[in-house]
Image: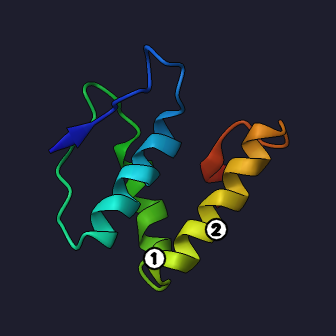
Amino acid sequence: MTGNWGCGAFRGDLRTKFLIQWLACSLAKKKMLYCPYGNKNVIENEKVIDRFKKMTIGESYKTILEAAEKVRTGEDTNIYEFL
């Protein structure tokens, strides 16, 4: 079970934190029970994960890193816009 750890208090991005947790669970071959604690953008998470279902974990990781770089440099403000 997981949730929005490191998102509010540490100014982390909810979407990026979700993707990191999802990748970790995928790599460990564990199911992830995500508790968004009032975040209504969970449907957005599901749509992005559907895209990754056809990729390997490595390909997903590379794609997420590229998207995170776009957010870090200010090209996008929402990592999902790049994905």
Camera sees residue 82: no
Cα gap from disc 1 to disc 2, whole angstroms: 10 Å
Q: Residues within 10 Å of mark 2 (few under 14, many from 20)?
A: some
Q: Return the disc, 1 or 2, that comes first in the chain's sequence.
A: 1
The correct choice, above or below, for 83 with respect to 15 in the image is below
What's the residue at 69%, 55% (across, down)? Answer: 67
- Measuring from the top left, give residue 11's x and y in whole percent: 54, 20
The C terminus appears in which quarter of the rendering? Answer: bottom right
Q: Residue furthest top?
A: 9
Disc 1 residue type?
A: Ile
Q: Write down the residue under mark 2.
A: 63
Camera-side residue: 73 or 39?
73
Q: Write down the residue under mark 1.
A: 57
- Measuring from the top left, give residue 63's x and y in whole percent: 64, 68
The correct choice, above or below, for 83 with respect to 54 in the image is above
The correct choice, above or below, for 39 with respect to 15 in the image is above
- Measuring from the top left, give residue 20's x and y in whole percent: 44, 52
Q: Residues within 10 Å of mark 1 (few under 14, many from 20)?
A: some
What's the residue at 34%, 32% (across, down)? Answer: 4
Mark 1, secondary structure of its residue: helix
